[in-house]
Image (spheres, rainbow, N blue to C red):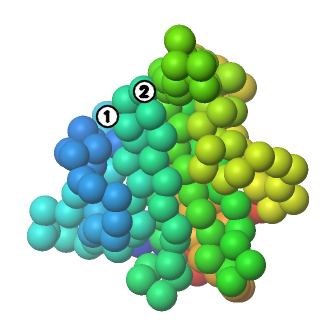
Amino acid sequence: MSLIEQLAQSARTFLANHPIHVDPGCDALPQGVHRFGLAQGSGSMVVLQPHDGRGKAIKAHWLPWASEGATTMVLAPDQTHIFFTSEMSGCRFTYEEQPDGRVRVAHLAGNIKVAKPTGKGEYTGGFGRNKAQDAMFGPGPHPLLRSLSYTEYGPNWAFVVGNYAGGHWKFVAQINRGDGVAQAVEVDRALTIQ
């Protein structure tokens, strides 16, 4: 069974057993729907990469990161039921369900800089991410807004996968410690890919 088939069969189990590293070629892709492949890395590590036309592929929404900034998009389940974002190291992943069933996602960089309204200086770090999030989603409270800040979980990286099933998007973050061990953390609900 290919790595793609294993991911599709049980994403939760796959993410718990295979730390995913995002190939730098993915970050060169614009946001949108692309085809991806998985390659075996060292040990249990798996590398997500743009599909090269060989072997199995998975079609997924892709949200890259922007250094010192934030990226956002609305996921359309009629295009594909899978979502990936760039690796997070100090970043925040946020999503909000829309009244029409679509979901808006955002990747806020750990090194984000948001200009202060006075024009003098910048908001940075967690406060900068809060300001950028408010600019994207509007000031709270947001009963359908969910966030995961990677800094809550340790010094290495995280990876977020989403799946549209049962009329809703579901997201799970994989926390990678760098020692070949991954931990799956629910952003909201358990991820199911069938």
| Quadrant placement of the C terminus | bottom right
Q: In which quarter of the image is residue 177?
A: top right
Percent across and percent down for residue 85 are: 45, 50
In percent of the image, x 71 and y 51: which residue is there? 138
| Quadrant placement of the N terminus | bottom left
Instruction: Identify the element where label 1 is drawn.
Output: loop
- With 9 as the anchor, is 190 left or right in this view? right
In percent of the image, x 68 and y 81: which residue is there? 101
Location of mark 2 (residue): 68
Looking at the image, residue 38 lies above or below residue 168:
above
Label 2 neighbourhood size at 10 Å, few (<14), some (14-19), many (20+)?
Answer: some
- As drawn, the label of residue 42 is 1
Between the C-alphas of marks 2 and 1, the distance is 31 Å
In percent of the image, x 69 and y 33: which residue is there? 130
Percent across and percent down for residue 154 are: 64, 20
User: Is residue 41 visible from the viewing direction of this image?
Assistant: yes
In percent of the image, x 71 and y 68: which residue is there? 97
Nearer to me, 31 or 187:
31
Percent across and percent down for residue 4 are: 38, 67
Nearer to me, 124 or 172:
124
- With 30 as the anchor, is 137 left or right in this view? right
Nearer to me, 87 or 112:
112
Answer yes or no: do the residues labelled 2 and 1 have beta carbons within 8 Å? no
Looking at the image, residue 156 lies above or below residue 158:
above
Amino acid type of the residue tagged 2 in the rendering: Glu
Instruction: Identify the element where label 2 is drawn.
Output: loop
- With 53 as the anchor, is 158 left or right in this view? right
Amino acid type of the residue tagged 1 in the rendering: Ser
Q: Earlier in the sequence, mark 2 or mark 1?
A: 1
